[in-house]
Amino acid sequence: MKISVGLPTGMEGLMYPVPFSTPADIVQIAVSAERLGYHSVWGNDHMTTQHYVRKEFATPPNYWEPLITYGFIAAATKTLRMGTGMLVLPMRRDIVVVAKQIATLDQFSNGRVEIGIGVGAYREEFEALQPNFRAHRGNMVDEGLQALRQLFTERAASHDGEYYQYRDVEMFPKPLQPNLPLYLGGNNQNAIQRAARAGDGWMPACVEASKLRDSTRLLHDLASKSGRDAARLEVAPQYIVYVGKNREQAVAKFKQSQMYNHLVSLSKSTLKEQGAIAHEDINLVGDAQHVIDLGAKLKEAGATHLLGLYFAVNTVPELLEQMQVFAEEVMPHLVKE
């Protein structure tokens, strides 16, 4: 099983306090992830401050654009892969420019790019950027994914859709990877169907193990019915992590983090289907053995990649420390075949 780290490109105010990380900190986190043996880093995509964050913090958060950020990380690392978790396509209206950015990054990083795509957890962000534009964000993602595949593979690409239009575009160079991985994010059935139909993997967030098992079976069944090789699809759930001396101490630290407040904020959107199960019971929160056991259960349920683990801390030094603890005490037990 692959294991990777969440990169705080757009997490201030949401998952971490304001302020949290500087550009130098973000590069340091990536360099540390490579040194510790993590597969990749995954940064999220936000453009403007969410309503509840404005109410909580007097100072606006810093949101670093992930693709530009990865240009610096690519220059500072050699083997670490870089992914977006997620790139919110509905906030990016010019799909040709997005494709060009991704292809350029893949070339300059020597083929180390993976792209997770989603509709965005906060519709208010989409409406702030495009107040007069009406769109079904799920349909926009479907069309955008189709356009990216076309632009990455065809010499001259044309598209006349509901949300994206371009004509006779020769977009070169193509990505260095012949099949640059494109994951689809989201917990609901629409996201699973989208991933089964057209993605290289599925990226849910904070899914309880038994539900992950059921959803993975559905993903594989739908993929097979679409004529695809289900075994080739990555199942890449994201989780919150805190490895403590014991379960009680870890839960207490988790509940003191901004990360916990973020999960509560998502209870009516991304995480609305998780029901009454406590966040600390779903996520990787506990002593090392508890986290190992839960990670093994997720692997048995179908997870192939614990993607972009987000450590429940409030400072960068704590984040680096938790990355090291997880790499030394937990990761060797989960990555082995």
Image (cartoon, rainbow, N blue to C red):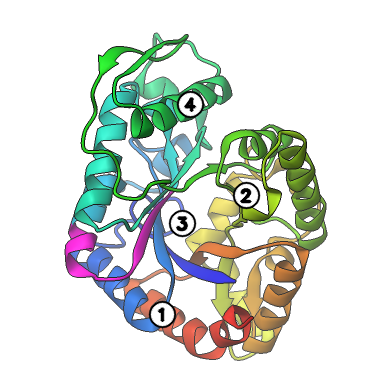
Mark closer to the observer (4, 1): 4
Check residue 37 in the rendering and tell me which mark sits there, or answer none. Answer: 1
Check residue 146 in the rendering and tell me which mark sits there, or answer none. Answer: 4
- 80 relative to 177, above or below: below
The reply, left or right, for residue 2 in relation to residue 195 is left
Q: Specify the farthest residue to the front.
A: 155
| Residue marked by disc 3 | 15
Mark closer to the observer (2, 3): 2
Tag 4, which secondary structure?
Answer: helix
- Residue stretch in magenta: 72-84
Taking the spot 42% from the left edge, 84% from the top edge, the residue there is 324
Give the percent coordinates (x, y) of residue 273.
Answer: 75, 43
Q: From where the camera sits, is residue 59 visible?
A: no
Q: Mark 4, residues whose alpha carbon is within 10 Å: few (<14), some, or many (≥20)?
A: few
Task: Find out whether residue 78 is within the magenta segment.
Answer: yes
Taking the spot 46% from the left edge, 56% from the top edge, the residue there is 15
Task: Find out whether residue 209 is within the magenta segment.
Answer: no
Check residue 303 in the rendering and tell me which mark sits there, or answer none. Answer: none
Tag 3, which secondary structure?
Answer: loop
Q: Quadrant of residue 32?
A: bottom left
Q: Mark 2, residues whose alpha carbon is within 10 Å: few (<14), some, or many (≥20)?
A: many
Along the polypeptide, which appears first: circle 4 or circle 1? 1
Taking the spot 29% from the left edge, 49% from the top edge, the residue there is 176
Q: Give the CA distance from mark 2 to mark 1.
A: 23 Å
The residue under label 2 is which amino acid type?
Answer: Pro
The residue under label 4 is which amino acid type?
Answer: Gln
Give the percent coordinates (x, y) of residue 228.
Answer: 67, 41
The reply, left or right, for residue 125 in relation to residue 65 is right
| Residue marked by disc 2 | 204
Q: Nearer the viewer, residue 113 or 69?
A: 113
